[in-house]
Image (tube, rainbow, N blue to C red):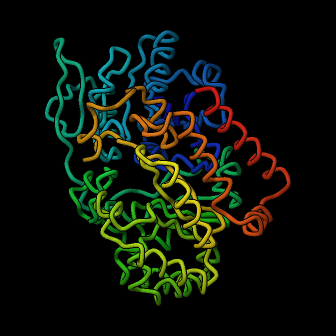
Amino acid sequence: MKILLVQPAKARDTIGCEDIFLYEPLALEYIASALVCDHDVRIIDLRLDKNLEAVFKEFNPDIVAATAYTVHVNTVKELFKVMKSWNSQIFTVVGGHHATVSYADFVESCIDLIVIGEGVFIFKEVVRRYENHIDFEGLQGIAYHKNGKTVMTPPVPVADLDSFPFPARFLTADYRKNYFSEWRKPLATVRTSQGCPYMCNFCALWKLNGGRYLTRKPEKIVEELSGIKEKYIFFADDESLIDTVRMSKLAKLIKESGIEKKYFLYGRSDTIVRHPEVIKHWKDIGLERIFIGLEFFRDKDLEDVRKRATIKDNEEAIRILNDLDISIFGSFIIKPDFTRDDFREFRKYCRSLLLHLPVFNVLTPLPGTDYFEKVKDKLITRNYDFFDLLHSLQETRLPLKEFYEEFYQLYRHSVSPLNRIFMLMKYSPQEIIKVIRMSNRIRNAYNSI
């Protein structure tokens, strides 16, 4: 069968996302890997390729499937409506994070089936049954229409990440030079683990695996890395460093293999503090940057979101990484009830950390999180286009325009001019222009509110 896999672009009102980073559609590459031996499969990345109609009509697919995060919900539903108007006989499927945490949002006449949970083998079975005109009854991890009702079956928990074939990266060959994160380009994405045992209330990732932390064998990861051409590697894990014994072994095997890459991964501050020797091993084989969820500048705020890390942990982790000359992608959260004094203290605190590029997000009640359940009745909008971490979905203590102005000024004044110049020197002149344009777009978006 002809199967078209679609990576959606962000909506017009969504801020950020592919303006800041653009990772390969790893989920679709995994989905494709289970199908390419028996079917004609294509991936279209609409973040880079806007010619969907031409591709659709030339390829003439039997099945069209899309993946979606929360900010893509409206976009994906509209895409399926349009594609159904081109050919009402296509079979449409949606999966991904949002379909897993809130499948009911995709119960639409333009969507024939929803995949819930890890979709590689589920979707393969969906394709087999559809091709052979077999009913979907009894298949776990799907929702579909039957006799005027929606039938939903819960997914089977993932047990072994190494059971999945390697991603079919050749299907994104025409796009690969464009995948990036900040100055790191071209960038490949690798999954080495899944899940998180921590239970932050603003995050749904730990819930998807019931708090389990699943890992791939280091040998399989090295095998996959050996086939990747890109210099820069992003580990797309929910948290990469939890199993430090495994990560130490992986670093050793990478070194022994002679693979030379530059790595970017997620790490908790308390893990870094407890295991600086592991970070040193990774520095020796090419670790260049670590994403740390620093979140707040007060311990009480960390406790409120169940972070299970402290300000002391954060500051010590920053010191360790600075001593190792590892770049820090420090992510912070802004509460809607912040006052001008809170913003002022936050700016002062961030300047004291001497970070080159702190990133700020508005505390967002994403579907699937405990925080969403806590405040869902107080949301000022349910338009998923605005669930981008840069819009406030709750009433702010400050007037909204003042809140956004203070939020914007965090980006402008939380880094010293010298550190800002140091960071910009990593970009090419063309990329610096893009950064400036992106900043102006964000400012204009806030001004229009």
Name the one closer to the observer, 142 or 432: 432
Would you say 124 lies left or right of 259 here?
Answer: left
Q: Is residue 130 above or below residue 271?
A: above
Give the total of numbered labels: 0
Query: In which quadrant of the rendered view does residue 446 lie?
Result: top right
Q: Position of residue 335 (x, y in %)?
A: 42, 48
The quarter of the picture where the C terminus appears is top right
Would you say 44 lies left or right of 89 here?
Answer: right
Q: What residue is at 39 percent from the left and 60 percent from the top?
A: 238
Q: Position of residue 194 (x, y in %)?
A: 35, 61
Residue sticking out furthest to the right = 429
Q: What residue is at 77 percent from the left and 61 percent from the top?
A: 424
Name the one closer to the observer, 418 or 169: 418
The quarter of the picture where the N terminus appears is top left
Q: What residue is at 39 percent from the left and 78 percent from the top?
A: 271
Q: What residue is at 34 percent from the left and 31 percent from the top?
A: 379
Q: Is residue 67 above or below residue 339?
A: above
Would you say 197 lies left or right of 21 here?
Answer: left
Q: Is residue 193 above or below residue 115?
A: below
Q: Position of residue 402 (x, y in %)?
A: 56, 38
Say whether residue 334 is visible: yes
Residue sticking out furthest to the front = 341
